[in-house]
Each structure stands twice: as C-alpha cells, then as structure tokens.
Image: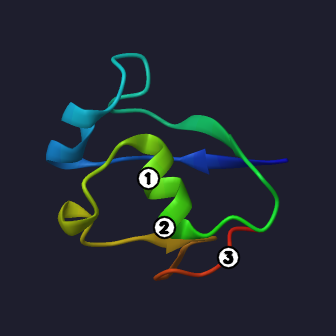
C-alpha cells in the first residue's frame, strides 16, 4: 500500500466526505495504482476532473508512486 496526499478543488468537493472537502487529506491505495484508480476511489466523476497534478506536475493516467 502507498499513501497519497490529495486536494480537491471547486465543485468536486461536493462528492467528498465533509471532513475531506476543501482541505488536504491522505488516501491509501495499492502500490502501482493509477491516477484513474485514485479518481474512482474518491467517487469523483471522471468527466469533471479537468486538471490532475502528481508531484506538482500536470499528469494524466500515470502510475501513482
């Protein structure tokens, strides 16, 4: 398992649990998970995610390490 630090912005906060909305939080994922898997685990509608950054750089469906 790996731990990733997540921040969701704008209207996407609607899909998060109250304690995770509008702030940084951590999420555990199996090692080798993709950014797509992270988006799914958060319950975010994929078509609504406009920008994704991993380690500060814009990303797409890269592996989360």
Q: Is residue 21 above or below residue 58?
A: above
Q: Nearer the viewer, residue 63 or 10?
A: 63
Residue in view at x 63 percent, y 37 percent:
26
**Residue 63: which numbered mark, if any?**
3
Mark 3, Cα crowd under 10 Å, few <14 / some 14-19 / many 20+, is some
Q: Which residue is mark 2?
A: 36
Mark 1, Cα crowd under 10 Å, few <14 / some 14-19 / many 20+, is few
Residue in view at x 44 percent, y 42 percent:
42
Q: Would residue 54 be found to the left or right of residue 16 on screen?
A: right
Residue in view at x 63 percent, y 39 percent:
27
Residue 51 position within the rendered picture, expressed as x and y whole percent measured from the top left: 32, 72
* 2 or 3: tag closer to the N-terminus: 2
**Alpha carbon of mark 2 to alpha carbon of mark 3: how far?**
9 Å
Q: Would residue 33 be found to the left or right of residue 21 on screen?
A: right
* 3 or 1: tag closer to the N-terminus: 1
Q: Is residue 47 above or below residue 29?
A: below
Residue 40 position within the rendered picture, expressed as x and y whole percent measured from the top left: 44, 52
Helix, strand or loop at disc 1?
Answer: helix
**Alpha carbon of mark 3 to alpha carbon of mark 1: how far?**
14 Å
Q: Which residue is mark 1?
A: 40
Helix, strand or loop at disc 3?
Answer: loop
Q: Nearer the viewer, mark 3 or mark 1?
A: 1
């Amino acid at each position: 398992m790996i731990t990733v630090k997540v921040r969701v912005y704008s209207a996407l906060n609607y899909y998060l649990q109250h304690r995770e909305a509008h702030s940084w939080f951590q999420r555990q994922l199996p090692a080798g998970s993709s950014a797509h898997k992270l988006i799914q685990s958060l319950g975010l509608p994929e078509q609504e995610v406009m920008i994704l950054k991993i380690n500060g750089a814009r990303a797409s469906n890269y592996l989360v390490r």
